[in-house]
Image: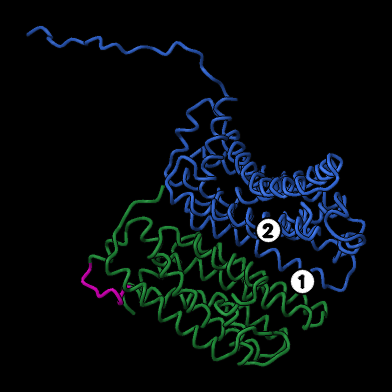
Chain colours: A green, B blue
Amino acid sequence: MSTVTWITARGLFGRRRFLMLLPLPAVLVGLAVLCRSLGVDPAEWGPPVLVGLGLAVVLPVVSLVVGTGVLGAEIDDGTVVHVLTKPLPRWQIVLPKLAVATGVSAATIAVPIVVAGVLADSVRLGVALAAASALGALAYSALFLALSLVTRRPVLLGLVYVLIWEGLLGRFVSGTKVLSVQQWVIALADRLAPTDLLTGAVSVPVAAVLTALVAVGFTALAIDRLRSFSVAGETS
Amino acid sequence: MSEPTGVIHDIGYQRYTGPRLGRRQVFGALWLHGLRTIFGLGRSAKAKIFPWLVIGIVTLVAAGLTAVRSQTGQVVMTYAQFADAMSWLVIFFAAVAAPELVSRDLRSGVLPLYFSRPLPRGDYALAKLLALATGLWLLLGGPQLVMFLGAAFATGEGLTGVRDELFDLLPGLLYAGLWAVVFASVGLLVASLTGKRAFAAGGVVAVFLMTTPIVGVLSILPSRTVNELALLASPSTLVQGVGLFTLGDQMAPAGAADEMIGDFGPVYALGAVLLVAACVALLLLRYRKVAAR
């Protein structure tokens, strides 16, 4: 475990504001337990809880806050200079940070979604959802990590993608679903555990290829951007 | 012991003898500055990107709706329904604007400078809140005005047509005001908790997005009462509930309101008032604590 990994993990967990992320998974589990205990048909509560809350809100929002935070927080307060001036290849900075971001986001979403998936259908669905959302967390984290190097306002740009592209356009213009991480996760989870609860709009090979492409492409972009990185003050 | 040789030169400093403006002017200045901050006026081009992106999209949708209406004569969306349809953009706009208003001041530590003026702590929070509410109202009201102008010029019935259209617009503007007040109070409260703009923006969006699926779940539970009260669970659907109660047929086809909220209309109105009151009270409490530091 490299020092960069250690610093990043401590930067994430050492702050009290990390606790702000906990209500999201808690609500997910709470709703699943509530529906199950009241005996509602899983076909009715499955889609709004698993997809509407889990994959469409908890996964992107957690990935966004964590993914832009691992590097963006250091850029914001200027301490990134201390890491950059060490004789480390840039990929040894980006990859550990990406690994921490992916790990934390995937763990945060995996626990509640396994519980909800088991309550909704079967253990298989729960594990499939967790595995697919871990891949989704990788794609989201790579995207948001690269965003935090490309622009000074990564969170807002990430929100544009999550809210407007995936949320708003995804509902009205079906063509945008091809380029939506959320749809890839749904397609992959449905392939791993076929049920009636999930309906993917993208074919599985397309989803798998695009997920890999986004993860690799944006990581490469982040490494490249960090090569010629200039530290500037906060935007006005 | 030598005599002191230094002298104090009179270089013409003058005391200010003009009128001193009071609390109301400070409040007004802070409100206007807040409003300009929201839209990025007087700031760099980068600060204008996100607000004007949202304004552009909203206006574009309004223009599209107006064009469809003047071509086909069909009302695709009423003014109130337009406000509902834009809810995601309003959330995003609140997530952009609220951290700019309060988080920057927290982070750069300028609050003691503000509070060294004749400005009570509560006034600072209320001026920011009023600015955000005004900004959100303008965001929704502007496009509604575009729709109104389009409809007014396209009407075939002369002044009566314009008057009918105006009576449709006014409740729509009031409804947009309700959206603005509710979203501003919740958004500003969340943003005032952290000095980091990134976290504040994420927090605002998380609060609004996380509560929406709860409504979806509550409305399929096997209890009629819970279903009819489900819209209370999220700020955006709470506003819709109040709209269904007060505006009736402007919001949804006849009978749909009964289906969704039953006889609980007054509960929704009360819920909205309580939510805003609670958020404002917590915001004032928060600034009592921040200012004491």
Quadrant for the N terminus of chain B in the image: top left
Taking the magenta stretch, the answer to whether it contains residue A174 is no
- Where is residue B80 shown, x and y percent of the image? 77, 52
Per the rendering, the mark at residue A194 is none
- Where is residue B219 shown, x and y percent of the image? 81, 69
Q: Which amino acid does label 2 sit on?
A: Gly
Quadrant of residue B77 within the rendered picture:
bottom right
- In depth, the one of A149 and B283 nearer the eye is A149
A109 versus B287 height, above or below: below
Seen at 33% across and 74% down, the residue is: A223
Q: Distance between the residues labelled 2 and 1?
A: 33 Å
Determine crowd level at label 1: few under 14, some 14-19, many 20+ residues with C-alpha closer than 10 A: many
- Where is residue A66 shown, x and y percent of the image? 48, 68
Q: Identify residue for label 2.
A: B64
Q: Identify residue for label 1.
A: B217
Q: What residue type is labelled 1?
A: Val
Tell me the chain of label 1. B
Q: Which of marks 2 and 1 is nearer the N terminus?
A: 2
Seen at 61% across and 87% down, the residue is: A189
A66 versus B34 height, above or below: below
Local secondary structure at mark 2: helix
Determine crowd level at label 2: few under 14, some 14-19, many 20+ residues with C-alpha closer than 10 A: few
